[in-house]
Image (cartoon, helix red, strand yellow):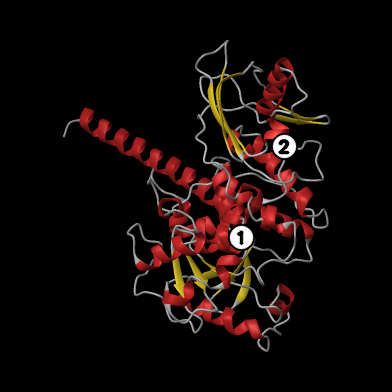
Amino acid sequence: MNHEESDFNSFERYFMNNIAIRQEETNLDKFERYVMNNIPIRLIRLSDMKFVVRSDVKKHFRDSVPLGDSLYHPSESVRYAILSHRWLDEGEPTYDDIKADTAEGLAGYVKLKNFCEKAREYGMEFAWSDTCCIDKNNSTELDESIRSMFRWYRNSAICIVHLAQSETIVDVEHDEWFTRGWTLQELLAPERIKFFYKRWAPLTGDEDDKNMEPTEVMETLERATLIPFEDLFFTPGPIRVDKRMTWAARRKTTRAEDAAYSLMGMFDVSLQVAYGEGGDRAFCRLVEAIMQAGDPSVFNWKGQSAEHCTSRAIPRSPQSYVNCQVLEFDAERLEMTMTSLGLRVPLAILPLNVSWRRFDGSSTCLKLKCPLCPAVEIDFTSYDHANLFPDDMGESDTSLRRNDYFNSYGLSSKGHV
């Protein structure tokens, strides 16, 4: 080997070593950001059932961060199990109970121990339970936990679900776990889920019950939740709002505000937690946050509007979206802003003429066309003829009433409705 080849090889080794060092630093940076921002504030260390915080987790997993792997993601290193369950009315171990080592006599401690045992069987060294891993006396910690919970379930290596009322697959569909508000995101967020019956026997022999195949468990989940199979593999975001709200409509929460807070992660929005504000006000804030993304499906609801809002365009609850008309919306974003005077949206107000009508007993069928934009054509059925076309209104007034009605529902001239 001549001097030129030797110099070239030395330079190549130096260059590759520097790349590896820089890559190591990059991976460590990703790892540290992930641990400090994307996993729970506090975990249970399964070896001794003691609490550890994020800095402890960082020290534990730091040496597992690979060198020179550009495809590395910190979730490959940081692995923990997370519990989803129906809370007992009383007797769940709290943060203070675990800290004081007084939890063993509580009814819920058996559940916690069984969960931790199942987590160990999955090779986990850490676990998280919402009963005891949040210091609920610390308002800052509680606020961060509620805002981050969807992400914590998403980033878990395995979500262990305890169905406390089910002893066979037939029972599962009627288990209370499917009626609670918070368990909706606990079903949708995790990538891997394992279900256990009341006495902690597994539903199946599979390691992961959230299966891309239409298994008996997946078909049961679809029936129990009324969520289509493909939507069980979920991507959060403020889209298809009308459809997604119906998934929460039958669910209940102990605190009224949680009906809104439990949906933050599903719609990928963030709200300040303010217990005591009331369910209506919390849901108004949720809808207003969702509206910022501009998906018009947020307005596809019916019934009574919320009381604590400057606009009557905001519904009272997820139930307002049930049994609404199935509408297809463009991907185009609708600009909408909530002001002190109410909701501001751009609307095109167009004249509508009745091109065809038919009276059929208790209903009136109309076909409406726009003389300025022939592409706008609306088929309409009313079951209240007296209010739709009062006898004492002239044709011009009737035209105005029709316009007011349709414009109040946000119909605009974009070639379709």
**Where residue 45 sits: x, y (%)?**
56, 73
On screen, residue 397 versus residue 79, left or right, reads right
Upstream in the sequence, badge 1 or badge 2?
1
Q: Residue at x 50, y 29 (%)?
A: 330
**Where residue 89 sits: x, y (%)?**
70, 78
**Vertically, is 311 above or below 132?**
above
Residue located farthest toward the bottom when viewing the structure as drawn? 105
How busy is the neighbourhood of tag 2: few (under 14 within 10 Å), some, or many (20 plus)? Answer: many
Q: Quadrant of the N terminus?
A: top left
In this view, the residue in front, 63 or 319, is 319
Label of residue 250 in the image:
1
In this view, the residue in front, 57 or 368, is 368
Q: Residue at x 39, y 63 (%)?
A: 219
Q: Residue at x 59, y 45 (%)?
A: 268
**Vertically, is 66 above or below 302?**
below
Q: Amino acid at mark 2?
A: Ala
Residue on which the image places disc 2: 313
Label of residue 8 in the image:
none
Asked which secondary structure carries label 2, the reply is loop
How many numbered marks appear?
2
Residue located farthest toward the top when viewing the structure as drawn? 372
How busy is the neighbourhood of tag 1: few (under 14 within 10 Å), some, or many (20 plus)? Answer: some
In this view, the residue in front, 41 or 194, is 194
Q: Residue 386 sits in which quadrant?
A: top right
State whether residue 348 appears in this view. yes
Q: CA distance from mark 1 to mark 2?
A: 22 Å
State whether residue 33 appears in this view. no
Q: Amino acid at mark 1?
A: Arg
